Image (tube, rainbow, N blue to C red):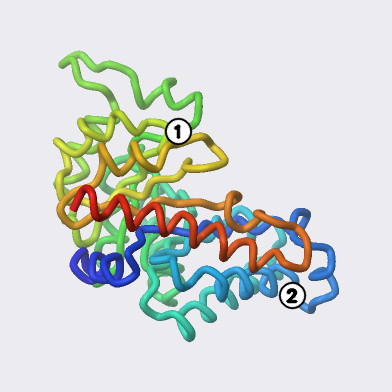
Amino acid sequence: MTVSELFEQIRRKQSFLCVGLDTDIRKIPQHLLSCDDPIFCFNRQIIDATAEYAVCYKPNLAFYEENGRTGWESLEKTIRYIRENHPEILIIADAKRGDIGNTSQMYARAFFGHDLADGVTLSPYMGRDTVDPFLKFDGKWAVLLALTSNPSAADFELQRLEDGSLLYEKVIKTSSQWGTPDDMMYVVGATQARMLTNIRQLIPDHFLLVPGVGAQGGSLEEVAQYGMNRQCGLLVNSSRGIIYADTTERFAEAAGDMASQMASQMSQLLKIYL
């Protein structure tokens, strides 16, 4: 999927919503625990309720790997369900891989060789070797951590270098030369929204995956104001705020309602900034 194809989906749905499938078996409605695969049963209903508004799904692998083999099976079922029923929707595996050499190649093959994702989140800390294997697959995306929203991001990302720039700026400047806007995205936390102006000067054409809106306190309006480009350039993620909007038997309906509300706000922002 190229930037143009992703933007076309955004225009068609009037939404740049990414739904995070951070499915915790301890938080899903109790009546689903009688299903053969409770996590997949939950995901399937969330997907059906939100696909009208979502342009991307982002399963966080930690919530599946925790459950061992059965968790991975739930993840695969979820991916196949999206592929078969909503093939236009981008899938980003939130895996935060970050290794080199043969290990990085194997990670890339694990996700892209089996078509388990369209993009994978990566930590670029060890440099280009971490990212290159993921760029060898046509139509796939390397999604690099750039400026995150956690409080301890300042430990490294906001450290000032000898040339006066910040470390996250150096990461973006250097890594943006490895790929193109059609195969590389960046993760920027919504709580860092005002810094998006500077980031857009560094990478005006790349898509940004923006977590942290809603439960983590980020402002959708500020993200759009400072981060939107001429092809939107944003995938704003909401996880808990959508998938756990309700814990009763109407959980899917509530998730759909929350996704609809976010998409409605996004539609208005697209009209303002595009």
- Neighbours of disc 1 within 10 Å: few (<14), some (14-19), many (20+): many
The residue tagged with tag 1: helix, strand or loop?
loop
The residue sitting at 24% across, 65% down in the picture is 7
Q: Look at the image and tell me whether residue 130 can be seen.
A: no
Which residue is label 1 attached to?
149
Amino acid carrying label 1: it is Ser
Front in this rendered view, residue 263 or 133: 263
Residue 91 picture location, percent across and down: 42, 67
* Quadrant of residue 63 within the rendered picture: bottom right
Q: Is residue 54 above or below residue 62?
A: below
Circle nearer the N terminus (1, 2): 2
- Neighbours of disc 2 within 10 Å: few (<14), some (14-19), many (20+): some
Left or right of residue 173: residue 248: right
Q: Which mark is residue 37?
A: 2
* Quadrant of residue 33 within the rendered picture: bottom right
Residue 42 picture location, percent across and down: 68, 69
Work out which quarter of the rendered image holds the N terminus and state it.
bottom left
Front in this rendered view, residue 48 or 206: 48
The residue sitting at 15% across, 53% down in the picture is 230
